Image: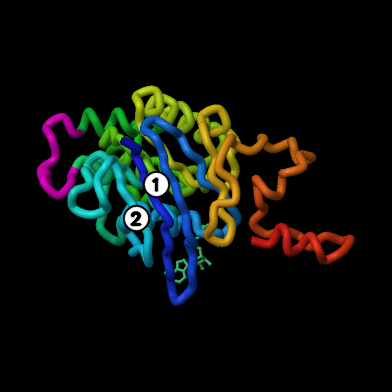
Amino acid sequence: MNAIDATDVHVTLGGQPIVRGVDLAVPPGQVVALLGANGSGKSTLVRALLGVVPLASGDVRLLGEPLGRGVPWQRVGYVPQRMAAAGGVPTTALEVVVSGLLHGRRLRPPRDRRARATAALAALGVEDLVDRRVQEMSGGQQQRVLIARALVREPALLVLDEPTTGIDLPTQDTFVTALSRLRDAGTTVVVILHEIGPFAPLIDRAVVLRHGRVVHDGPPPPARGEHGHAEHDHLHPHADPEPPADGPDLTLEVTP
Ligand SMILES: Nc1ncnc2c1ncn2[C@@H]1O[C@H](COP(=O)(O)OP(=O)(O)OP(=O)(O)O)[C@@H](O)[C@H]1O
């Protein structure tokens, strides 16, 4: 049974086709990086896979169940992109992380909630923030609290949308270590990344989107510093390419 089975997924937003016929089968335990330029449809695809935006057509199964109430959602963790910090209500990191232990059938947090929340925060190096208000934290600290909220469920499937945006490199390394532990425990991970960077050793497979279609599905692209690679633009499209100085033809090739 695959963790994700998506067939011919189409998503239309504001009358525009955003995801255009994506097939994606992710076996359990695989770590998949979803790459592509800004606007290529990565966030929309994962939101469709998780049932957050409706499919125009196609078929999605998560952990063996068709999208809907049958999916064991308590085994699915999701860290959306740039989630706003808990509005105006004062909320501590503990409360945010413990909310990751709640789901439709469990509205009362378990007794060992504090220990579990602290362990999840510790995996990201921020256990000392447990009683701090998220409103008073930096963007990077808030992001780590949100990742801890997804980790505390010990999900079978974890989906992360650019989780390290706004997080400094040493902290990214801590996060990579936390993800490695999850992978070793058999968790399936789909992670949208802008740069493979420190994630390289973790990634089993890279799926690259362009204009809502899969243009590469296979081994991860070469790490940065190998820009001479012939397929560089294909595998690692730049978000905001400079027009080439020596002719307009390439522009079409690299514009997202
Ligand atoms: N609710 C919406 N209504 C209309 N268009 C939308 C909506 N959400 C996203 N889009 C458009 O869909 C396209 C894909 O957006 P999406 O966020 O999926 O891309 P992405 O690859 O995740 O980019 P980024 O790296 O910037 O997050 C963009 O052109 C965006 O403007």
Q: Residue at x 76, y 60 (%)?
A: 242
Q: Residue at x 45, y 76 (%)?
A: 15
Q: CA distance from mark 2 to mark 1?
A: 34 Å
Residue 22 locus on image (x, y percent) = 47, 54
Q: Amino acid at mark 2?
A: Asp
- Magenta-span inclusion, residue 100: no
Q: Which mark is residue 59?
A: 2
Q: Residue at x 54, y 32 (%)?
A: 170
Q: Residue at x 22, y 42 (%)?
A: 74
Say which residue label 1 marks: 142
Which range is magenta? 102-113
Residue 127 locus on image (x, y percent) = 34, 31
Residue 215 locus on image (x, y percent) = 59, 51
- Magenta span: predominant SS is loop
- Residue 5 visible in the picture: yes
Q: Please, is residue 207 above or below residue 58 in the view?
A: above
Q: Amino acid at mark 1?
A: Gln
Quarter of the rendering containing residue 5: top left
